[in-house]
Amino acid sequence: MLSVGDKAPQFTLNGDGNKVKLSDFKGKKVVLYFYPKDLTPGCTIEACAFRDDVGALKKLGAVVLGVSADTEKTHQKFTAKHELNFPLLADVNHEVSDKYGAWQEKSMYGRKYWGIARITYIIDENGKIAKAYEKVKPATHSEEVIAAIKSLG
């Protein structure tokens, strides 16, 4: 995982039919959240909470970007089904997730596998990590992020 004060690694990923670059958001705060899989219960709860709070985040000068290893096509279904109002970025080769420490070994029912961990970073206007969340509760995470951005000023 990256730490507060680290420079956020630059990236370009496909999202919403466009190339999205971290550098596109210079001068804004970026809520970069990594999540395991589109259309699954926890990920849906988290995405819908960000959707509902995106107005408050915009007022604070922040944008939301969701990242998973799913394809753009799956992202489009997820976005349409839940009326998401922020880009979901396709990191199918997990290169960006790896740079941000979100590509991790996981375990379920005794089986080990690699996947994206639920991790969030708040990146400041200068491209530095201002806050990092390793343990995320999907239902309350967006509120936690809003409070953190308010405290950052």
Image (tube, helix red, strand yellow):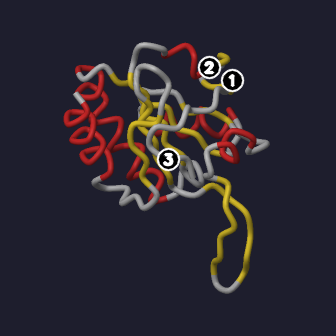
Q: Residue lying farthest bottom?
A: 110
User: What residue would you read off at disc 2?
Assistant: 21
Q: Please identify, in this view, whether the residue under mark 3 or under mark 2 is nearer the observer.
A: 3
Instruction: Quote the CA–CA distance across marks 1 and 3.
Output: 21 Å
Closer to the chain start, of discs 3 and 2, is: 3
Q: Residue lying farthest right?
A: 93
Percent position (x, y) of residue 9?
Answer: 63, 32
Q: Residue at x 44, y 50 (%)?
A: 44
Q: Could you say whether the residue bearing mark 1 is in a helix, strand or loop?
A: strand
Q: Amino acid at mark 1?
A: Thr
Q: Amino acid at mark 2?
A: Lys
Percent position (x, y) of residue 136?
Answer: 40, 58
Q: Quadrant of residue 95?
A: top right
114 is higher (above) or lower (below) than 143: below
Frontmost residue, 44 versus 31: 31
Numbered tag placed on residue 12 in the rendering: 1
Instruction: Quote the CA–CA distance across marks 3 and 2.
Output: 21 Å
Q: Quadrant of residue 88?
A: top right
Mark 3 residue crowding within 10 angstroms, few (<14) / some (14–19) / many (20+): some
Q: Could you say whether the residue bearing mark 3 is in a helix, strand or loop?
A: loop
41 is higher (above) or lower (below) than 77: below
Kindly indicate whether the residue at mark 1 contacts the one at mark 2 (C-beta within 8 angstroms).
Answer: yes
Q: Please identify, in this view, whether the residue under mark 1 or under mark 3 is nearer the observer.
A: 3
Q: Residue at x 64, y 84 (%)?
A: 109
Q: Residue at x 25, y 23 (%)?
A: 60
Kindly indicate whether the residue at mark 3 contacts the one at mark 1 (C-beta within 8 angstroms).
Answer: no
Instruction: Quote the CA–CA distance across marks 2 and 1.
Output: 4 Å
Numbered tag placed on residue 3 in the rendering: 3
Q: Residue at x 25, y 33 (%)?
A: 152
Mark 1 residue crowding within 10 angstroms, few (<14) / some (14–19) / many (20+): some
